[in-house]
Amino acid sequence: MAQDPQRHHRHSIWLEGYDYAQPGAYFITIVTYQRAYFFGEIKNNEMTLSNYGRIVNECWQSISDHFPNIELGAYVVMPNHVHGIIVIHDRADANVSARRGTIYRAPTEKFGKPVIGSIPTIVRTVKAAVTRRVGRELNATGIWQRN
C-alpha cells in the first residue's frame, strides 16, 4: 500500500532540543514490526520466550557492557515489545564509551556524529544487535517497528 503524504506524516518521537544523554531514568518501549508476537507467548500468566525473545533478553542485559555510564532498571520482554528502564549516570563516564566509539547515530544528531550514551543511540544499538543476531542465528529480518 502506497503512503499518502497528506495522511501519513512521520514525526520523530524524540523531543526536539532535549538532551537525551543527560543523567536520569528513562522508560523505554521498543515494539515489533506490525506488533507481531515474535518474542514468545504468555502461558499460565507467565512469559515464555521464543528464540527471538531470548536474543532480545540477552542483548538488553548487555547494554551496560557497551555503555559503562548506564545502569539497567527493571525490564520485561513481552510477546511483541520490550519495556525497560535505563538510568544514565554522570556524563564523565560516557567519555570511556566515546573512546570506544559507535557506528550508530541518533535521529536528533548530525550524520556521523552520534551522542555517545544517549537514549536514541542506546535504543538503536540494542535494535541493531538484535537484528544482526536474529539474522545470523534465525535467518530472519524485519523485527522492529520504526521509531
Image: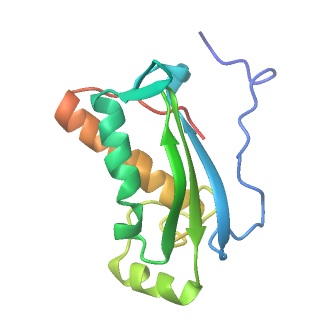
- Describe residue 26's horizontal placement relative to residue 139 as left or right: right
Residue 104: image x %, image y %? Answer: 44, 60
Q: Nearer the viewer, residue 87 or 74?
A: 74
Tell me, yes or no, if residue 39 can be seen here: no
Tell me, yes or no, if residue 21 can be seen here: yes
Q: Nearer the viewer, residue 101 or 29?
A: 29
In the rendered image, which quarter is residue 134 located in? top left
Residue 101: image x %, image y %? Answer: 37, 74
Q: Nearer the viewer, residue 23 or 18?
A: 23
Q: Residue at x 37, y 84 (%)?
A: 99
In the rendered image, the quadrant that contains the C terminus is top right
Q: Residue at x 30, y 41 (%)?
A: 55
Residue 4: image x %, image y %? Answer: 72, 18
In the displayed structure, 51 sits above or below 84; it is: above
In the displayed structure, 32 sits above or below 26; it is: above
Residue 63: image x %, image y %? Answer: 40, 61
Q: Residue at x 48, y 19 (%)?
A: 36
Q: Residue at x 50, y 71 (%)?
A: 70
Marker count (numbered): 0
Direction top: furthest residue = 1
Q: Nearer the viewer, residue 142 or 91?
A: 91
- Describe residue 113's horizontal placement relative to residue 10 as left or right: left
Direction bottom: furthest residue = 92
In the rendered image, the quadrant that contains the N terminus is top right
In the rendered image, which quarter is residue 8 located in? top right
